Image (cartoon, grey):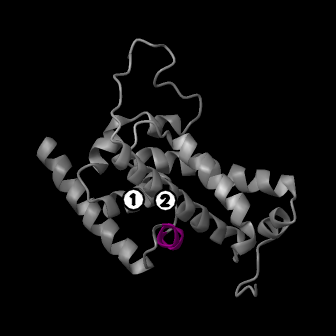
Amino acid sequence: MARSREDGPLVARARTGDEDAWRELHRAHARRLVVWLASLPSGDPAASPEDVAADAWLTAATKLGEFAGSDDDFAGWLFTIARNVLSNRRRTAQRRRTDATAVDGTDPVWGTSPSPEGAVHDQDATRLLLAHLSPREAEVVACVDVVGLDVATTATALGMTPTAVRVARHRALGRLRKVLAEEA
């Protein structure tokens, strides 16, 4: 397969099986991928953001030979894979129609997260605010404002143009300002 863009050094090393390169890619993207997935409605109570992220990493490892691009492009490609995994899980959950069981809030382990991104993951307010938006707008806001992806990477991850990302974000933030003003 002829590559249209030059591969980044980490991607090139990972493609040859270099474990250190995979660790660096994982270190650069794993946390924000899980935070982003946690901010989106999964539609499947049995699917944790960590499980979806693990499936995305496995798919990325399997299909790395098909990827062409820089180390920065890798993030958009990985987020696209994760989005597709999440969509597949949503469809599966709809077919299975499983229901979540009540969580015992007295369990001392429930809701704790030793990592800094746990602050976002554990905030129901973020998910409640995103619920006021369309799914597309929620994904854009989660990518750009929750996990800090740039517009180009967000566009790649969500299969949108950069202009569509900026427009969706603009509309979403306006909608969220109205929601917050009504609640104040």
Q: How many marks?
A: 2
Of helix, strand and loop, which one carries label 1? helix
Q: Where is residue 41 in the image (x, y as percent from the top left)?
A: 37, 47
Q: Is 83 positioned to the left or the right of 14 in the image? A: left
Q: Determine which of the numbered discs, if any, sits on residue 83 in the image.
A: 2
Q: Does the magenta stretch include residue 153?
A: yes
Prevalent SS, magenta region: helix
- Specify few, some or many for label 2: CA neighbours under 10 Å numbering under 14, 14-19, or 20 or more: many
Vertical comparison of 141 with 39: above or below: below
Q: Which of marks 1 and 2 is in front?
A: 2
Residue at 70 percent across and 88 percent down: it is: 4
Crowd class of label 1 (few under 14; some 14 to 19; many from 20; radius 10 Å): many
Give percent across and percent down for residue 37: 48, 49
The amino acid pointed to by label 2 is: Arg
Residue 43 in view in this figure = no
Q: Circles 1 and 2: CB distance less than 8 Å?
A: yes
Q: In which quarter of the image is the C terminus?
A: top left
Indicate the quadrant containing the N terminus: top left, top right, bottom left or bottom right: bottom right
Q: What element carries label 2?
A: helix
Q: Give the range drawn in magenta.
A: 151-157
Q: Which residue lies furthest to the left in this view?
A: 182
Residue drawn at x 40%, y 42% as measured from the top left:
44
Q: Which residue is drawn at 76% across and 76% down?
A: 7
The alpha-carbon separation of the residues under discs 1 and 2 comes to 9 Å
Q: Position of residue 161 (x, y in %)?
A: 43, 79
What's the mark number on residue 53? none
Badge 1 is on which residue? 139
Examine the structure image and report whether residue 2 is included in the region drawn in magenta: no
Q: Nearer the viewer, residue 154 or 45?
A: 45
Q: Which of marks 1 and 2 is nearer the N terminus?
A: 2
Classify residue 87 as left or right of residue 183.
Answer: right
